[in-house]
Amino acid sequence: MKRKIIEINEELCNGCGNCVTGCSEGALKIINGKAKVVNDKFCDGFGDCIGHCPTGALKIVERDTVEFDENAVESHLRSNFGEDAVAKMKEAQKKHAPAPAAQHHHHGGCPSARFMNFKGDNDKNTAQSAAGDTVSGVVNSELKQWPVQLHLVSPAHPAFMNCDILMAADCVAFTFGDFHRKLLKGKTLAIMCPKLDDTEGYVEKLAEIFKNNNIKSVTCAIMEVPCCSGLLRIVKTALAESGADIPLKTITIGVAGSVKDLSI
């Protein structure tokens, strides 16, 4: 089957082993001073190891290989590393599972948590827009990656590396008419609802994103309603826990779609 899996550039790999400890499935091992995938069926393709690599030697590719086998991973971990490693793997897999409907707006859950990068496609769309497509009413997407819901994103998604992040409340995209061009363009997106989401684990996930991805800036786009301030609190707490010195900008949108406040 064709699926996503980790690929290692041995020329860039310095054998530090950070990726080995970062992989909860035990798919990686240092062999002759270089990281290797010991068995393709142990790699889930989510890329949690990527953010631990200091040299950029790891990336996610799509190729023909065997299907990820969680049962085989469990046996592998239990035989070689014990029950604690099995428990760690199961927790990691839970983080990648689609969010249940009850956790977010009762929308039936996300149909797919498969990571995708749209940067090339949307660069082409932008060029087409410049050539005049928008005259006919076409507004192209500025979205760079999928998924975007904070429950579903991985801290090691390649789109977070060396990026500007837009952390937006769900309602902002529906109220601010120029969301894509004025807020989203050039940024990696994560969305949440501080009132309706189960926000347990959000601070820890964001802190990991901020700490491990050389983030350039964070923009919080929130609504003027009081409950939306919870998003800003979560982001500020995560920034403090990460220890990263990242510029933070806040944009407040009114319920009628106007920009009410801009704080840098």
Image (cartoon, rainbow, N blue to C red):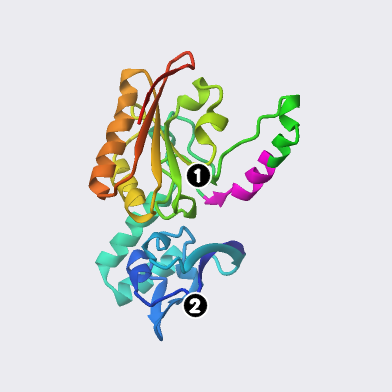
Q: Earlier in the sequence, mark 2 or mark 1?
A: 2
Q: Which mark is residue 11?
A: 2
Real-space CA distance between mark 2 and mark 1, rounded to the nearest whole angstrom: 31 Å
Of the residues shown, which amino acid type is indicated by label 1? Pro
Other residues around mark 2 within 10 Å, as few (<14) / some (14–19) / many (≥20): few
Query: The C terminus lies in which quarter of the figure?
Result: top left
Element carrying mark 2: loop
Of the residues shown, which amino acid type is indicated by label 2? Glu
Q: Within the image, what quadrant is residue 239 found in?
A: top left
* Residue at the top extreme of this rendering: 256
- Which one is nearer the viewer's eye here, 239 or 72? 239
Residue 215 % position (x, y): 39, 49
- Image position of 39 with respect to 22: above or below: below
| The magenta stretch spans residue 116 | yes
Q: Is residue 24 something that shows in the picture?
A: no
- Image position of 79 with respect to 179: above or below: below
Per the picture, the main secondary structure of the magenta-coloured stretch is helix
Element carrying mark 1: loop
Residue 165 % position (x, y): 43, 42
**Residue at the image point whose x is 73% and y is 39% from the top:** 128
> Magenta region: which residues?
114-126
Residue 28 % position (x, y): 41, 73
| The magenta stretch spans residue 74 | no
Question: Which residue is the site of mark 1?
Answer: 147
